[in-house]
Amino acid sequence: MKMKDFFPFCLVFYFLTSSAISLAQTKIKVDYTTGPGQPVEQVEAVFRSPTNVANGQAILILHHGGGYGANTTQQYAEMFSNHGFATLELIMFQDVRSFNRPDPMAMHGQVMGGLKYLAQVSGVDSKKVSAMGMSLGAFLTMNATSSWFYEHYQAGALRFNKLVALYPVCWMMSEASKGNTKDIPIFKGLPNSFLQQFAEIPLLILAAGQDSYDSLDAEACPKFAKSILNPLQSAMTKVEVFPNATHGWDHGKDYSFPVRGGCTGRTSCTNRTISSPATVEQGKQAVMSFLTKP
């Protein structure tokens, strides 16, 4: 190629590539409310159309407490999109330093907003919208098994199809199943009994056997599943424990930090995260198998 032709070629390539990326993913705003009679607000999100043959399914992806800017959700959005899913990644907040971090009632409202948005996307079966969350996002997906969630946010007949929770803090969920939500910030504003009546939705929990928040108790999430009061919801809850994995195995880096009051029994501890690409791949396979199984 002659030099005089090289720069026009580069420009054409750039614009074609940029157009392909913009068609594949779009930043949008999703309507939500915090409850009946409350004003409509908006949360930013990234929507992706399927890059492969569409399968009629969609999935809402919820980031962890490090925020959307930690770039953890994107790898899953790409995977789902390549398998024919429409995807929506909520940007509840950008990072841990965000001053506009929403409270739990707002975050649950945003999850409902995501469900309602995906249910009306062309080519998506409204009965096949699922959700997956990590850590903070895992709380939100697990809470979406409750009848309270659909009643409070006025979902009508709309329900998630399936739910996936990656490395949730299960001692907190066990407390919620007993109605003991006091002094657990993620449950602030929710009724104490919110996790005692269920919508009976299939739930997959991928748990870390070396989760610092759960005091390295590999049985914390299996114990939660057994504590679910509704026998059908309990039977529909599958737990897979990765024995050597830590909280945040998909963060792509190793780090640790002190946690005040967020560990087993409201105690303090040091959370240790170790990146595990092998666990990431195991998790992806488990999630795809769960979501695509009839």
Image (tube, rainbow, N blue to C red):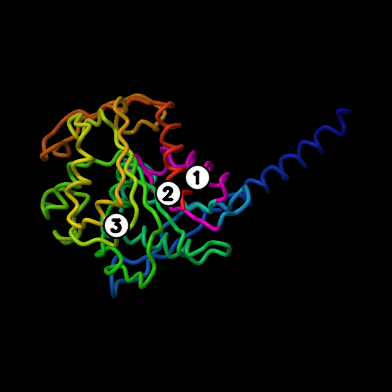
Left or right, 187 with respect to 55, comes to left
Horizontally, residue 51 falls left or right of residue 174, namely right
Marks 1 and 2, the one that precedes in the sequence:
2
- The answer to which of 139 and 209 lies nearer the viewer is 209
Asked if the residues shown at circle 1 and circle 2 are in contact, with their CB atoms under 8 angstroms apart, the answer is yes
Residue type, label 1? Ala
Residue at left 80%, top 34%?
Answer: 7
Q: Secondary structure at mark 1?
A: helix
Residue at screen point 19% across, 31% down: 217
Q: Residue 111 in magenta?
A: no
Residue 271 location in percent, x, y? 23, 30
Q: Is residue 46 above or below residue 240?
A: below
Q: Is residue 79 left or right of residue 43?
A: right
Q: Is residue 149 left or right of residue 171?
A: right
Q: CA distance from mark 1 to mark 2?
A: 7 Å
Which residue lies under the disc numbered 3?
Answer: 145
Residue corresponding to mark 1? 77
The disc placed on residue 61 is 2
Q: Which residues are magenta?
A: 56-84
